[in-house]
Every structure is written in structure tokens, then in C-alpha cells.
Image (cartoon, rainbow, N blue to C red):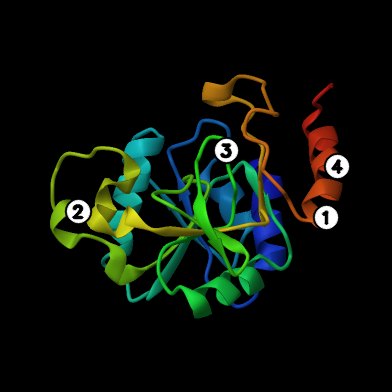
Amino acid sequence: MTEICIQNLLETKKGATLLIYDDHSTEYDLNWLRELAPSAFVLQKPIKLGIERLRFEIHRDISLTPFQYIYHTDNDTIHDPEWLTELHRIFMIYPKWIGLYRSPFHKYKLKADRFFFGTTCPGVSYFYPLNALDTEKLKTTKHKFWDFAFGEHLKEVAVSEVSYVEHFGGGGLHNSDFERDRAINPTPYLVSKREEVLNLLGVVK
């Protein structure tokens, strides 16, 4: 799934810079990742941190970079080819925290301009301006949930009415349940690609 995800991002990211964080995986090494995505920046943590702490430390690292805008996703997703176009459309209306994946486990309200508002969004798809990070909270040696680093900025998150990201949550905490995190209202492209990805993963329905 990691290979499918990275190849999809390389094909759809347009001019964006791709950073790949490896949580000290035992499934592949840095050389494999660098050969797969030679144009990306590939970084590896010295020990396995787990998803919550890894995301928190990524925020800490990102806060020290010159990048102004950050989009985060996980290695079990695929994106519609127009995901950056939709992100830009919402950003021109609401230039703050944005998500492109509608999860069955999050509640949204105040529908407007083809997006919803929520109080957070899933970690598999979120965009934010660098100044949304709470630099004081990032200085702590402790971590809480990954969105702890954003402090009060999470009160209103714009989430696209149409999902431009599909999440294949099988494996890990979700065991083999690839239906659990299935996107709500995905694009036609994601609908067509889902069957193809499941076949590549050898998932028997």
C-alpha cells in the first residue's frame, strides 16, 4: 500500500514538494523509499514512535522549515488527480485548516460552498498554514494527540463535501477491515480506483 500511495502522490502533487517520513519501518528501508521517490525528501526516525507521537514530531520538524503551507496524509491513502485544485478552491474561500476526506466517524455542520465545517478532521488528510502551529506547545517534551500542536486553531475546519481522498484502513489497528474507513461521497475517480487497489492488495471480498 505504501508503494501505491507514493506513486499516486508523485502523479498528482503537481509542483508541491513531497516529504516522506518513515517511522522506522521493518517492511522497507530508506534506500527503497529513495529509489521509489527520488525527487522527494525522505527522513527516518531513529526508533519507532507510533502514529500519534510521529505526527506530533513531524509538526515540530515542519515548524523549523521555510514552507508556508503543509498538507499531511498517510501511507494507506490514494488521492484524486484534482485534489490540489479542490484544496486551492476551498483555500480561496477559507484560508485556514482544510480536510479533503469525509470520514464516517466525524460530524460536520454549516454546509457552504460545497464544504462543511467541523471541529477537527482525520489525520489522513489535513492542510494548514504553518502559522497555525502553536510553537509553544511544540516545545514540550511530552505529546498528546497529534492535533495538540494546533491549540485553538482547530475550532473550525473546512472539509470538502466530496472526498478527494480514499482511505484503505486495513492492517494495523483496523486488522483486515478495509470498509471501516471508507470515504463518504468519493469522487468518481476514487470509486473506480478502489476496486483496482483492493485487487493489488490481494483483498478478497
Is 91 rendered above or below residue 18?
A: below
Disc 4 marks which residue?
196
Report the front residue among 47 and 125: 125
Disc 2 marks which residue?
138
Report the front residue among 135 and 30: 135
Q: Position of residue 14 (x, y in %)?
A: 65, 74
Element marked by disc 1? helix
* Residue at figure coordinates x 16%, y 52% from the top left: 137
Q: The residue under label 3 is which amino acid type?
A: Tyr
Disc 1 marks which residue?
188
Name the side, left or right, on which 203 lies relative to 109: right
Mark 4 or mark 1, which has the lower sequence index? 1
Distance between mark 1 and mark 3 Cα atoms: 32 Å
Name the side, left or right, on which 18 lies relative to 11: left
Report the front residue among 168 and 60: 168
Q: Are marks 1 and 3 in contact (CB under 8 Å)?
A: no
Q: Position of residue 68 (x, y in %)?
A: 37, 76
Is 124 rendered above or below residue 28?
A: below
Q: The residue under label 2 is which amino acid type?
A: Leu
* Number of other residues with Cα within 10 Å of mark 3, as a class: few under 14, some 14 to 19, many 20 or more: few
* Residue at figure coordinates x 60%, y 19% from the top left: 175
Mark 4 or mark 2, which has the lower sequence index? 2
